[in-house]
Amino acid sequence: ESDDRMLPPKLRGYAPQVSGIADTNARVVISQQGRILYDSTVPAGPFTIQDLDSSVRGRLDVEVIEQDGRKKTFQVDTAYVPYLTRPGQVRYRLVSGRSRNYEHTMEGPVFAAGEASWGISNKWSLYGGGIVAGDYNALAVGLGRDLSEFGTVSADVTQSVARIPGEETKQGKSWRLSYSKRFDDVNTDITFAGYRFSERNYMTMDQYLNARYRNDFTGREKELYTVTLNKNFEDWKASVNLQYSHQTYWDRRTSDYYTLSVNRYFDAFSFKNIALGLSASRSKYQNRDNDSAFVRLSVPWGTGTASYSGSMSNDRYTNTVGYSDTLNNGLSSYSLNAGVNSGGGQPSQRQMSAYYNHNGSLTNLSASFSAVENGYSSFGMSASGGATVTMKGAALHAGGMNGGTRLLVDTDGVGGVPVDGGRVYTNRWGIGVVTDVSSYYRNTTSVDLNRLPEDMEATRSVVESVLTEGAIGYREFEVLKGSRLFAVLRLADNSHPPFGASVTNAKGRELGMVADSGLAWLSGVNPGETLNVGWDGRTQCVVDIPAHPDPAQQLLLPCRQVK
């Protein structure tokens, strides 16, 4: 697979975005053809998911699972022109495997799939792709065109052939037209990511598997329209986002989804950066309507944020006040909320919820609690972490799942050294793992000097690395652990070592240098150890540190000659 991350940032591709509204602390599951791409918990209110992989393309199935068990389902097209490739470049992807259903069991034949895009010129790009899976095969070809000031456009057609036992061979085509344009003069983006039209007998691989193994021939898409508009009003510190999609089927009722969100920042009285957000959405799926509206006002208060939110979903209204803040210099965060549900022909219900998240050195921990008067109560907790074992050392760590790029740091046997803003602490063997490392970027990793204990000193506190995807890098810090003290070094003849003589420990680490009259400021000194004093390129004498040195007193250290 070609990896855009190997290219400079300005030459990299697009990553899709998914937006919606959660009525409670909800679980959001994003899947594509039965494969789960994203699964996480979001707080109540509008949410935007932007950390999907840039290789994700096509239609996404979004499921919002509320804490009371309610589910909202809608589909989102990634809404961009996918086939434009820079002149002379070839982007490709190859994959092989077997499909896995929602019960996490394998089904269907082994398949191979591939796609490629070639930048023919500065204006034209050619695209092709296909799937080979025994009784199911599909082939696609398309063209992309840069229209300069008029935007970008692409068109493609896909032919599928499916053979199902007991059924006649089903062949069909699907056409798609995509358009995108940014209007810089008015600071607006418009993306028209459909029209898509599919013939009745056209089948995706997911539909083929449902038909063959579950006898489910429903859900055949016919037409799809998708429009996305983003507009920024810089003078008003405001932004507007509008999304609309319309899906028709050959054997099912029409499905619609549209959402509008408005966000603005402003100052009032002594409060700065007050945030006001308004969102509304409507989804119509399987002839069922689901309307939602949400308003949120956030005011900075102390070190945290006080907020009010109001929401409406299917004639049920919720008013909530809350407070959120961070702890441990941003490594932990929490939120507390209380409110009232009313309407919908049901009695009013008080509710409360709490959420906590901690990014620790060994694990990422999150916990949530929610309760509704005379209703449900729920508690959830999740923890994630990993272990990295190499020839250079091993350590437990937070994150770093699925073999992601990471950096193994070594502090020369000194444990408890804070690294990467205090998110990582080295273990008792002086090994730690930094997991938030970007592939193909120049990454800078440093010891957190503000959190470094008093008895430690970092003589080399910053390292750089450029790692490939999935690599485990290795870097060493120079960290000394021990007391700091003044000492006067004296030779056997009552003279002093020469100016500039070096004082090192058994590992060869320099702890200080000799100044005039044998005076030396030493750091990283441990009780009872023997230090080497050298000049003229070799060790000339050694000094013994007392078992109980007093850092407040100046020590007189005899320097005995090396035998």
Image: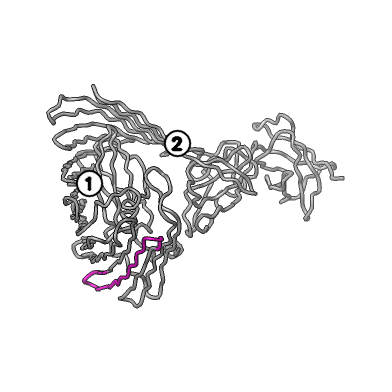
Number of numbered markers: 2
Q: Where is residue 59? Give x, y as percent.
A: 29, 55
- Type of amino acid at the residue the image marks with label 1: Tyr
Q: Let me know if residue 255 appears in the view.
A: no
Q: Nearer the viewer, residue 93 or 336?
A: 93
The vertical placement of 374 against 144, above or below, is: above
Q: Residues within 10 Å of mark 1 (few under 14, many from 20)?
A: some
- N-terminal-most mark, 1 or 2: 1
Q: Examine the residues drawn in magenta and state their main secondary structure.
A: strand
Q: Residues within 10 Å of mark 2 (few under 14, many from 20)?
A: some
Residue at image mark 2: 383
Q: Nearer the viewer, residue 4 or 438?
A: 4
The vertical placement of 97 against 515, above or below, is: below
Secondary structure beneath label 2: strand
Answer whether residue 559 is magenta in the image.
Answer: no
Answer whether residue 151 is magenta in the image.
Answer: yes
Q: Nearer the viewer, residue 356 or 165?
A: 165
Picture residue at 28% right of the left edge, 36% below the top: 66
Residue at image mark 1: 265
Which contiguous range is marked in magenta? 132-155
Q: Where is residue 446? Give x, y as percent.
A: 52, 48
Q: Is residue 524 left or right of residue 437?
A: right
CB under 8 Å between callouts 1 and 2? no
Q: Where is residue 275? Give x, y as percent.
A: 23, 43
Q: Residue furthest right?
A: 563
The vertical placement of 544 against 31, above or below, is: above
